[in-house]
Image (tube, helix red, strand yellow):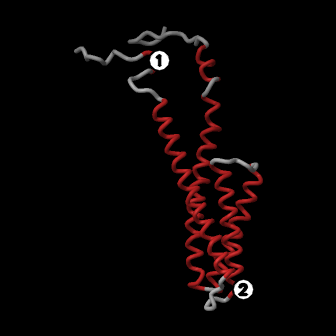
Amino acid sequence: MNRIGSDKRQPGGQGLGTTSRPATGARSIRTGSLLLLVLVVLVVALSMIVSFVEFVLKPDPAVRAGPMYVTLTLTTGAALLMLVMALNESFLPIMSREKAVNGQLVMWAMGITGVVTGLLTLGRAAGPIAWRFALGAIAFMFITRQNARLARARAAAPEASPAAPARQSAPRHRSRQRRGGRKR
């Protein structure tokens, strides 16, 4: 029984398709998704700035001003720091890894403190601020997860790149075994 085409293989693992197209597509998807996530963080930061400026220029008499200033200051500062951290994690590496970790710690501390302070002292008046910060935080977490995944892939890549073909090109010295029986 002769199977047509079963023994016709391309040499060196070359098939009909090329491998550069999927890599290029994956790279453009990654870049596009990172851009969208950074834009979400940017919109959150801008909306926090607008809310802060509006409340400073024209305070709402129904809301206690002291806790609202504290809430807006902490969450706006955290949102701006989140924008800087998102840019650092995605397109514009401006900080070392240690400074980025410290910046993220400060960002989370400010943001969570601002949201908790607002929700405990102001209640429903701080709800939109908490939701905006939560939306930015979710986008930021996706950015950091994607960056961590890419860092792991980059760390694993040098092991399989130029050094591997040089090792494989050396001839292997193994004794041969006949097809149907034991080695004698």
Q: Is residue 158 above or below residue 65?
A: above
The percent coordinates of residue 28 (x first, y second) are: 51, 42
**In screen coordinates, is 109 left or right of 164?**
right
In the foreground, 26 or 2: 26
Neighbourhood count class around disc 1 (C-alpha, 10 Å): few under 14, some 14–19, many 20 upward: few
In the foreground, 111 or 166: 111
What residue is shown at x 29% (from left), y 17% (from top)?
5
Q: Are marks 2 and 1 in contact (CB under 8 Å)?
A: no
Q: Which residue does the numbered mark 1 point to in the structure image? A: 12
Upstream in sequence: badge 2 or badge 1: 1
Q: Secondary structure at mark 2?
A: helix
Q: Secondary structure at mark 1?
A: helix
Q: Amino acid at mark 1?
A: Gly
The percent coordinates of residue 180 (x first, y second) are: 38, 12
How many numbered discs sit on the rendered protein? 2
Q: Which dot, 2 or 1, sits closer to the camera? A: 2
Q: Which residue does the numbered mark 2 point to in the structure image? A: 66
Q: Quadrant of residue 136?
A: bottom right
Q: Quadrant of residue 14?
A: top left
Q: Is residue 60 above or below residue 39?
A: below
Q: Amino acid at mark 2?
A: Gly
Q: Quadrant of the N terminus?
A: top left
